Image (spheres, rainbow, N blue to C red):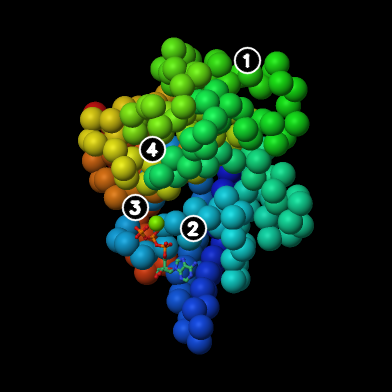
Amino acid sequence: MGYAVEAIDLVKVYRVGKREVWALRGLNLKVKEGEFLAVVGPSGSGKSTLLNLIGALDRPTSGAVLVDGIDTSKLSDSELSRFRNEKIGFVFQSFNLINRISVIRNVELPAMVKGTPKDVRERRARELLEEVGLGDKIYMKPLELSGGEQQRVAIARALINNPRFVLADEPTGNLDSVTSKEIYRLLRRLNRMHGTTVIVVTHDLELAQECDRIVYLRDGKVEREVIPVER
Ligand SMILES: Nc1ncnc2c1ncn2[C@@H]1O[C@H](COP(=O)(O)OP(=O)(O)OP(=O)(O)O)[C@@H](O)[C@H]1O
Ligand SMILES: [Mg+2]
């Protein structure tokens, strides 16, 4: 069976002047289609580096990442941007919304880049904003919303091109615990409804319990894995 993501002996070395920083030291990981995976571990253990390599925002020093069976290191730059735009939805701690345009236009952006006709992408953006509970705020500006609402906009934006993957790097890092829980429930619901594979980096072990599997990183490798018990 093919995996949604397969990281094979993944090594990432950053060069800082003459120094080498080994962010990943031969990491192996398989993620199943439709899985909701949490990645946890101490600061500097390589979580963001791993997510960036899976999302093809960066290239490995050695080893390979297969995403949907595609070795992203073999893609050209233009193939890579298309791959990212159509297959992957990114969600960041800092929301990364554009504050001078409305919520609905923010959500439409990746579809605009893809070339989806205006009426189609607008309809889809509306549906998604309904789904994340913001149907009545689509013409507001991001900064007029609460942090949790802004992150829900970012999640709707991540889903606009029907990606196979959502990659979220500490999506609740700027949110209080009640709102964080809501964001997890939302990611979980979208994962079940759309069958999207979700990989979320977090420091919050309690939230990680909401996921199908928790992968612990240490020193750029997988230290251990845990399947949370159903509650
Ligand atoms: N662009 C970069 N240039 C140089 N070193 C980097 C770069 N990005 C990350 N590193 C280094 O690689 C290692 C892993 O960093 P990474 O950001 O993946 O950790 P992390 O697990 O996400 O940590 P945190 O929980 O603090 O976000 C760290 O030692 C970091 O300093
Ligand atoms: Mg990080």
Kind of element beneath mark 2: helix
Q: Which residue matches tag 2?
A: 50
Give the percent coordinates (x, y) of residue 209.
29, 39
Give the percent coordinates (x, y) of residue 53.
56, 57
Residue farthest to the front, as pictured:
100
Ligand 2, by image quadrant, is: bottom left
Front tag of 4 and 3: 3
User: Mark 2: is the Cβ under 8 angstroms from ligand 1?
Assistant: yes
Amino acid type shown at disc 2? Leu
Q: In the picture provided, is 123 more to the left or to the right than 18?
A: right
Amino acid type shown at disc 1? Arg
User: Mark 3: is the Cβ under 8 angstroms from ligand 1?
Assistant: no
Front tag of 4 and 1: 1
Q: Which residue matches tag 1?
A: 123
Q: Which residue matches tag 4?
A: 212
Determine the CA span between mark 4 and mark 1: 32 Å
Q: In the picture provided, is 1 more to the left or to the right than 138?
A: right
Determine the CA span between mark 3 and mark 2: 11 Å
Other residues around mark 2 within 10 Å, as few (<14) / some (14–19) / many (≥20): many
Determine the CA span between mark 3 and mark 1: 36 Å
Mark 1–mark 2 CB contact (< 8 Å)? no
Judge by depth and name the residue closer to the eye, 63 or 91.
91
Other residues around mark 3 within 10 Å, as few (<14) / some (14–19) / many (≥20): many
Front tag of 1 and 2: 1
For residue 125, which quarter of the picture? top right
Mark toward the start of the polypeptide (3 vs 2): 3
